[in-house]
Image: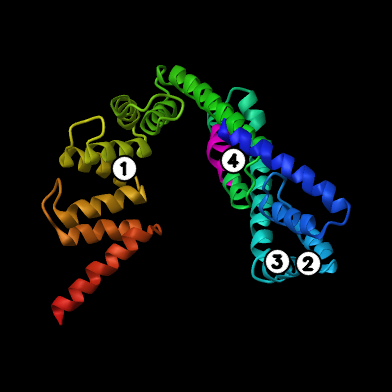
Amino acid sequence: MNQANDNKADTEIVTQLCRAAKLGDAEALYQLGFRYFNGKGIPLNPDMAKECWQKAAELGHVEAQQSLDECCGDDVCPKVKQITKLIDEAAKKIQESLESIAPKAAEGDAVAMYLMGVVCLKNMPLMFKLLERLGDDSEEVRKAQAEFQVMGERFYRLAVKQWRKAATQEDVHAQRWLGYCYASGEGVRQDYVKSTKWYRKAAEQGDVHAQCSLGCHYYEGKGVVQNYTKAVKWFRKAAEQGLAIAQYNIGLFYANGKGVAEDKVEAATWYRKAAEQGDEDAIDALKEIELASQQIEE
């Protein structure tokens, strides 16, 4: 209620300033410039702010000239333009994403519907945050945020509905996706027990990502009793299929003696496998082991 009153008051102030500015009131032009520059009670517009300050400065307003020098100099305006550029780039990427996945989502493709949810709930908020950095907290922006929130949650629920139907028919990809959604709370209430259930079904069918995720659940004790031995078991299955992150995790277990006997040589073996696939954590871990070995030799 207070925010609504504040917005109404800002709008009324801007209206009064605009009337006075048209009559050549230097102070009104000066104040209106600040409103444009900060997006307070009026859409943010650095160019209009500059124009108002220039007119005020020509009328002899000293503070307006200072604002021109400070806020429209090389230090500030480029930052505003940079954020504006980021917004344009984000909008372009979002548009491209929607154009590529919306048709598939309309046809009932579960992955496409999930990705539509990602665009609405994760990509769009990034653009809204950029707008906030520019001071745009208008009613239109807040309304758009709320609409995308509702839309994104709806897409998530539709995707989960499709995956649940397919998962009961032993579709391994649907089972893995359900495991992920229950873990993340996207489209369903977060439930690690159900997440583990679906990850296990997919893992037992050989899905490498589900095997790794199930290993993470055992390692962290999410939905199951924490058990390093079982974590190693599932990480190893994924690692043996060539999944780099699982290979790195196996290396960690051997390096720290969790779920297996500590073995630096075996740890290095698994780190190396992951490093050969470009895993940066594995590359760093391998360097540490090699450095430690050199120090011992010296």
Magenta stretch, main secondary structure, is helix
**Callout 4 amino acid:** Met
Q: Are marks 4 and 3 in contact (CB under 8 Å)?
A: no
Q: Quadrant of residue 170?
A: top left
Of helix, strand and loop, which one carries label 2? loop
Distance (Cα) linking label 4 and label 2? 41 Å
Residue 295, image x, y percentages:
17, 78
Q: What residue is rendered at 18% in x and 73% in y?
A: 293
The label on residue 175 is: none
Q: Are marks 2 and 3 in contact (CB under 8 Å)?
A: no
Camera sees residue 256: yes
| Residue position for label 4 | 124
Q: Nearer the viewer, residue 240 or 44?
A: 44
Q: Is residue 35 above or below residue 65?
A: above
Residue 121 on the magenta span = yes
Q: Quadrant of residue 273?
A: bottom left
The label on residue 61 is: 2
Residue 297, image x, y percentages:
14, 79
Q: Is residue 190 left or right of residue 34?
A: left
